[in-house]
Image: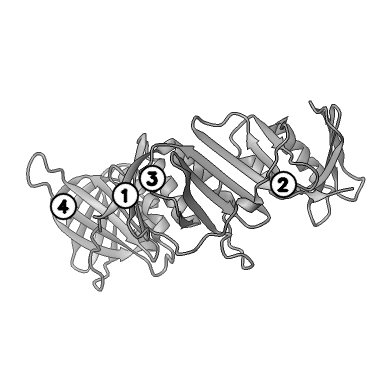
Amino acid sequence: MRLIISSNKLNVAVQRIHFAVADKKMAFVSLKASKGENEDDQSKVTIASTDSSLDIYSEHACDVQGNGECHVLAKLFMDMIRQLPDGEVGLSLEGRFLVIRTQEKTHFVMKIPIITEYVWIPEQPLIDSDTFDLQSAQVLYMISQLLFSLLPDLTYRFADLGFLHQPSPRVLRLVATDTIKLSYSDIHCELPENVLTEGVCFSRKALTAIAKVCEQGASKIQFSLSKDRTVCHVKTEGYDVYVRTTHASYPDYTGLMPTKIFEPIIIDREMMIGMIKRVMLSADQTKILSFHFEEGIFTLSAHDTSDGRETAPIDYQRKPMTFGLNGELLTTILGHIMSTHISISFGGKGAPLVLYGTNEPGDCLARHIMAPISED
């Protein structure tokens, strides 16, 4: 194997495949160089990595002078690529080493031992699958609105899983909940009939890898699901991610959604974040803040203390209402809402609150639902 490629392309490949490098000390990266046999057949190198849940392939055009493949330890290879200067880089298989040489300005040479026990794992296209296109920007927005809330929780097994399903024929919904809060994001798109009626679960890592595909600049990504719904293939030109979906029967989350919604209150998002951060300085360890709404005035104070308090004018014309919310959690949610103003919808005393941005991207919708702490 012998090829010349730009260091920028190598860095792109490393950024793409690192999601499949769960244990950097033991994981490996595979490289396969293929020289084009004619003018229409482009010479390329494919750089891949795999773990128990992901297979990722990153393909790049380059000057291939000799076909071949090799496998090296992921940590050493990825750390080295990140430190390379801009310019052309030579990669060659010499004996039991992958030799990396810079071609410009400086003359750097490093040998990385190859792993002979491994063989190239070819892509396994989903022959019998449901395939459809999705808008990259829509999918990226959908994932970004929920990814922050997917965290391991020993008390709730679904806390780090996103549930992707089809609640109606032209709506794709991603859901995340830890029983304290519920977040969901919808995109409106053309879908095959009943393609995700039952839905599938994705880990945080898998959703992050899918989001990376959406960031490659293409307007659309191709999304395929095996008939048994155990494998998902997401691709754009030169970039393929195979995800083994998580086998879990996601619980019915609709019980956490409010049954009645009043007219929302509109608040400047940055103003709200600033108020919370200031009042949080005097909050106790619970981080609970008291929210009080009365005609024309919004008051935020530290729960059960008088040390921190801030008021702001607001368009509110209903009966006074007071409730408590976790300030840290609310700040995190507000930080991910991509809007200048937020809407807070109440469902009555003790009912869940719904937060969302007032100007979301076209055909996209995200809702964050929190259970308030009643204050009489």
Residue 260: x %, y % from top left:
70, 40
Residue under numbered circle 4: 34
Q: Disc 1 residue type?
A: Asp
Image color mode: one colour
Q: Alpha carbon of mark 3 to alpha carbon of mark 4: how far?
A: 23 Å
Q: Disc 2 residue type?
A: Pro
- For the N terminus, the quadrant is bottom left
Residue depicted at 83% across the width and 54% down the height:
284
Residue under numbered circle 1: 130
Of the numbered discs 4 and 1, the one sitting upstream in the chain is 4
**Which is more foreground, mark 3 or mark 4?**
3
Q: Disc 4 residue type?
A: Ser
Q: Residues within 10 Å of mark 1 (few under 14, many from 20)?
A: some
The numbered dot on residue 213 is: 3
Q: Alpha carbon of mark 1 to alpha carbon of mark 3: how far?
A: 19 Å
Q: Nearer the viewer, residue 147 or 66?
A: 147
Asked if 275 appears above or below 282 in the picture, the reply is above
Q: Nearer the viewer, residue 23 or 371?
A: 371
Is residue 77 found left or right of 305 in the rendered image? left
The numbered dot on residue 352 is: 2
**Which is more foreground, mark 3 or mark 2?**
2
Residue depicted at 68% across the width and 33% down the height:
343
Q: Alpha carbon of mark 2 to alpha carbon of mark 1: how far?
A: 37 Å
**Which is more foreground, mark 4 or mark 1?**
1
Disc 4 + disc 1, Cβ < 8 Å:
no
Of the numbered discs 2 and 4, the one sitting upstream in the chain is 4
Residue depicted at 19% across the width and 54% down the height:
33
Q: Nearer the viewer, residue 6 or 108?
A: 6
